[in-house]
Image: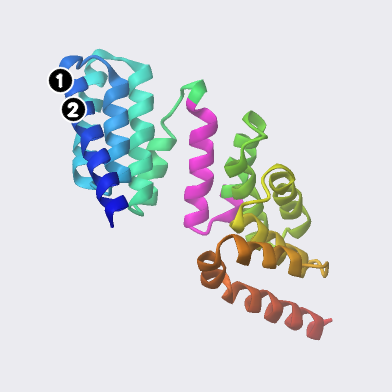
Amino acid sequence: MENEQAKKKQSEQLVHRLVKAIDANPEKFNNYYDLGSLLTRLHDYVQAEELFQKALGIFEKKGDQKAINLLKYGLGNLYYSVEKVDEAIKYYNQIDDDRLKADSYLMLAQSYMKKKQYKQAVAYGLTAYELRSEDLEINQVLGDSMLALGEFKQAEQYYDQILLHHPGRADTQFNRGLVAMALSEPYKKYLAQAKQLDLDYYQKSEKRISDIEHALRKLKKND
């Protein structure tokens, strides 16, 4: 409880500091982005949206493309957080800043995953992968999309790339276990790792194990 209180106080101080920074230097667009992103993380979505929209209006008038791109990315993330996925996609698609390209393609891939449009997710994921192949989240979204499409061998490659350097990810270990199960390979070690790393995640995802087992039994019956 004390820890939560301390975190809350810290967040309030940070909000206060960023508001003061904006007042002191209204030309600095990064402060608007940082404050909007912080408010999004604090689930203060109404204020975050108002701030992003207001800041966009300011910098669109100036024609400051760098600012516009970053603020649109922030708005996209806000809409993604509140499940307004189509709105998020609209903003991610407007970003033409090279430094934000990989991030926006990743978010587009994740947005299409949410919409269960896995082929589009793969298309954007691969574009992001070309720009930043070492990125864990890009590999994860590609693995998850391939798994959803039943492309198990390809999913396996992306998950293995993550686990090679970051074995401590419960979601990757779990999904790697599902892929191994689908490919009739040893899978229990992956699921055991996932369970050990994050019991809560494992229990929430457990139904997917029986779903895959059921699907495989059905396939064998059809053969």
- Range of the magenta residues? 100-120
Viewer-nearest residue: 73 or 195: 195
Q: Where does label 1 land, which residue?
A: 23
* Label annotation for residue 186: none
Q: CA distance from mark 1 to mark 2?
A: 6 Å
Residue depicted at 21% across the width and 21% down the height: 21
Residue depicted at 75% across the width and 70% down the height: 188
Task: Tell me if mark 2 has few (under 14), some (14-19) or many (20+) residues whose alpha carbon lies within 10 angstroms of its own.
Answer: some
Q: How many marks do you count on the picture?
A: 2
Query: Does 161 appear in magenta?
Result: no
From the top left corner, tell me how far across and down residue 119 is, in percent.
61, 52
Asked if disc 1 and disc 2 are in contact, CB closer than 8 Å, the reply is yes
* Label annotation for residue 19: 2
From the top left corner, tell me how far across and down residue 56 is, in percent.
25, 27
From the top left corner, tell me how far across and down residue 170 is, in percent.
60, 58
The residue type indicated by label 1 comes to Asp
Q: Is residue 164 left or right of residue 127?
A: right
From the top left corner, tell me how far across and down residue 41 is, in percent.
33, 44
